[in-house]
Image (cartoon, rainbow, N blue to C red):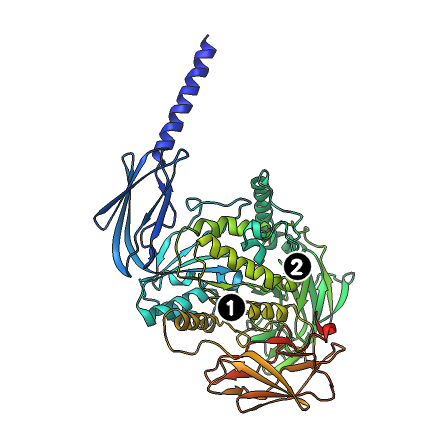
């Protein structure tokens, strides 16, 4: 009997504690409803939450009381009338003797900022002139809510996200999205309307991850993903992946093994290592070591030296004569490496490099004209033979990046926001889709349509960044996934209430993350100011409108070309193709605010394109300095062979 009573006692205690725990957290509110929040002005706003099933919820705002009743599962929502811009306000929410008070609320314009790393990129991540921007960031009515990174195979609600509203100050702005910050600042300075940015972005993620399941799964363009997170076992899979990611980072930063092996010392014997020529790409898993011996003379040992590599992966360490002189920090831009005085010496010197590419197994090193040591105005060429080995340290643990699965970021980081009204969306994404660029136009339009449906705002403004120039520049016609994405983004302007910021002039051939975020954010803001805030300002570069064939020439006319088209330097970047679909460069000139192309010896021109490569020459701009969008146009359906 005592065992029965003991069991009953434990059951009673468990049930009692469960009830106490439930009562203690019975009233909950959307995580977006916090102190310092911005609510969209001039639209009715919805408050959602949970409470005890069938309990009454009271909301007091501006001395007016509203009530509603939780349903049988405890969910509730309440719609309050629209308010004009301004504040501060207080909001009181109560149920079953529990009251929550939200302070310092302002009504203004709320923008959703989303995409991958170039939208996520923080102001302090060595963006251009970021220290000055931080010092000047005294705008308490610009507020950010950074949605914590999370994934889910099923949609979450507004109580399941993490984040908080932060007022802008020099102490806080450094952790804001740089693009979104410059966008918000430009809008606020022109309107004096409080601005709220909800930043929901994640680096290295494809568009499929941000799209609702119904718009991706089962379609003919279904994103191939053998590691899809199923609703039953996903938490365990994610836990394993997170543990592996932590272990991988520990391996990358572990110094014990290579110190014990003395891999950077002059005395280490590397004669059995593989030999490769640099610069170049080298396919190598795991942590890769490279070594080169140099016999130097006439070195000024009392003066610092400089190492130029040009390009190197995200994990990169340099040792000279067994002393580490450089370790690339997170988000650090590429640049020259300073070698302190006294490291190099006359005679034999050893350079050792420890590196790994955390995104792929391709390790690319150096550029031909930027690979050298410099000491006292003497340049020592480092191209040629190096010795390499990727078997010296424990193989890196491989972790599955589940954040790339279709819909998992929409479910966890976008769906919880859909009851929170917004002025519009700014979007910067596409880099992770360049390998499947032919699908992007359909995918992008699907994402825009689905978000508008979910927000129940069919005309929700959607402004986005066209991909910037990136990678090595080539001087001959090529096919390009980056150019295809840009074309898909250009074509998406056919969707109502969209706008595109062209950034073909702000990129970096060596860095997928352009550090000039100010230009990007301000170009997005110019679109919003012109389209939504009724300012009569230019907001776009030239966009191809018509192409007319004339005698041995083509006449190209552009929108957003007035008052004048101009060339930044020589007018270059135009290519034409005939029935054989072989593109060739052609000369161009500006006449009467139109671009005239020479058709050369091609009798039937089937296609024209401009700035068509990963990192093209793009010299056409308008008088306001906005660059023309890259494009590809097909002139006649009879030339079907030119279509990709």
Q: Secondary structure at mark 1?
A: strand
Q: Which residue is mark 1?
A: 465
Q: Which residue is mark 2?
A: 360
Q: In the image shown, does 208 or 37 lie closer to the viewer?
A: 208
- Residue 139 on image: x %, y %: 32, 65
Asked where in the image residue 100 lies, by quadrant, the reply is top left
What number of labels is visible? 2
- The numbered mark, 1 or 2, whose residue comes first in the sequence reads 2
- Residue 193 on image: x %, y %: 31, 65
- Residue 532 on image: x %, y %: 39, 68
- Residue at mark 1 to residue at mark 2: CA–CA distance: 25 Å
| Position of 172 relative to 52 (above/below) | below
Q: Secondary structure at mark 2?
A: loop
The residue under the point 61% across, 50% down is 217
For residue 409, side relative to residue 548 (left or right) = left
| Position of 169 relative to 529 (above/below) | above
For residue 643, side relative to residue 35 (left or right) = right
In the rendered image, the residue lying farthest to the top is: 1
Asked where in the image residue 196 lies, by quadrant, the reply is bottom left
């Amino acid at each position: 009997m005592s065992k029965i009573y003991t069991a009953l006692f434990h059951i009673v205690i468990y049930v009692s504690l469960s009830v106490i725990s439930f009562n203690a957290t019975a009233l909950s509110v959307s995580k977006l409803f916090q102190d310092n929040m911005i609510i969209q002005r001039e639209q009715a706003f919805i408050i959602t939450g949970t409470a005890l099933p069938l309990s009454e919820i009271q909301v007091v705002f501006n001395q007016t009381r509203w009530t509603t009743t939780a349903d049988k599962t405890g969910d509730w929502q309440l719609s309050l009338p629209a308010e004009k811009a301004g504040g501060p306000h207080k909001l009181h929410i109560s149920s079953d003797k529990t009251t929550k008070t939200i302070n310092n609320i302002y009504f203004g314009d709320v923008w959703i900022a989303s995409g991958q790393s170039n939208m996520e990129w923080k102001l302090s991540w060595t963006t251009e002139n970021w220290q000055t921007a931080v010092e000047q960031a005294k705008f308490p009515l610009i507020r950010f809510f950074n949605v914590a990174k999370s994934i889910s195979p099923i949609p979450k609600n507004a109580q399941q996200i993490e984040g908080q509203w932060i007022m802008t100050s020099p102490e806080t702005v450094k952790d804001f999205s740089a693009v979104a910050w410059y966008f918000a600042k430009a809008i606020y300075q022109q309107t004096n309307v409080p601005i709220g940015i909800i930043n929901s972005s994640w680096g290295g993620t494809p568009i499929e991850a941000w799209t609702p399941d119904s718009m991706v799964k089962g379609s003919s363009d279904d994103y191939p993903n053998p590691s899809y997170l199923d609703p039953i076992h996903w938490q365990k899979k994610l836990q394993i992946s997170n543990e592996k990611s932590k272990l991988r980072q520990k391996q990358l930063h572990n110094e014990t093994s290579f110190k014990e092996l003395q891999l950077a010392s002059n005395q280490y014997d590397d004669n059995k290592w593989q030999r490769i020529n640099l610069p170049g790409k080298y396919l190598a898993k795991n942590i890769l070591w490279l070594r080169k011996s140099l016999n130097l003379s006439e070195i000024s040992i009392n003066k610092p030296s400089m190492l130029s590599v040009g390009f190197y992966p995200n994990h990169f360490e340099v040792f000279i004569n067994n002393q580490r002189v450089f370790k690339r920090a997170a988000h650090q831009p590429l640049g020259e490496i300073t070698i302190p005085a006294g490291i190099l010496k006359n005679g034999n010197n050893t350079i050792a490099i420890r590196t790994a590419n955390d995104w792929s197994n391709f390790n690319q090193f150096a550029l031909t004209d930027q690979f050298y040591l410099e000491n006292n105005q003497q340049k020592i060429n480092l191209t040629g033979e190096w010795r390499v080995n990727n078997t010296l340290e424990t193989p890196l643990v491989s972790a599955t990046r589940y954040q790339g699965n279709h819909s998992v970021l929409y479910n966890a980081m976008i769906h919880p926001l859909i009851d929170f009204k917004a002025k519009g969306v700014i979007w910067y994404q596409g880099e992770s889709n360049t390998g499947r660029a032919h699908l992007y136009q359909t995918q992008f339009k699907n994402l825009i349509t689905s978000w508008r449906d979910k927000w129940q705002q069919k005309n929700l403004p959607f402004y986005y960044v066209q991909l910037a120039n990136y990678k090595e520049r080539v001087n001959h016609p090529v096919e390009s996934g980056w150019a295809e994405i840009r074309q898909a983004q250009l074509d998406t302007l056919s969707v109502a209430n969209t706008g595109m910021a062209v950034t073909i002039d702000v990129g970096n051939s060596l860095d997928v993350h352009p550090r000039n975020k100010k230009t990007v954010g301000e170009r997005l803001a110019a679109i919003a100011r012109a389209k939504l805030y009724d300012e009569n300002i230019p907001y776009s570069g030239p966009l191809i409108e018509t192409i007319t064939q004339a005698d041995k020439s083509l006449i190209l006319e552009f929108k957003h070309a007035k008052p004048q088209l101009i060339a930044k330097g020589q007018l270059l970047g135009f290519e034409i193709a005939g029935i054989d679909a072989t593109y060739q460069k052609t000369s161009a000139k500006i006449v009467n605010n139109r671009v005239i192309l020479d058709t050369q010896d091609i009798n039937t021109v089937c296609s024209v394109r401009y700035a068509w490569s990963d990192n093209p020459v793009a010299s056409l701009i308008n008088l306001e300095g906005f660059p023309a969008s890259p494009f590809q146009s097909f002139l006649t359906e009879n030339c079907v062979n030119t279509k990709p």
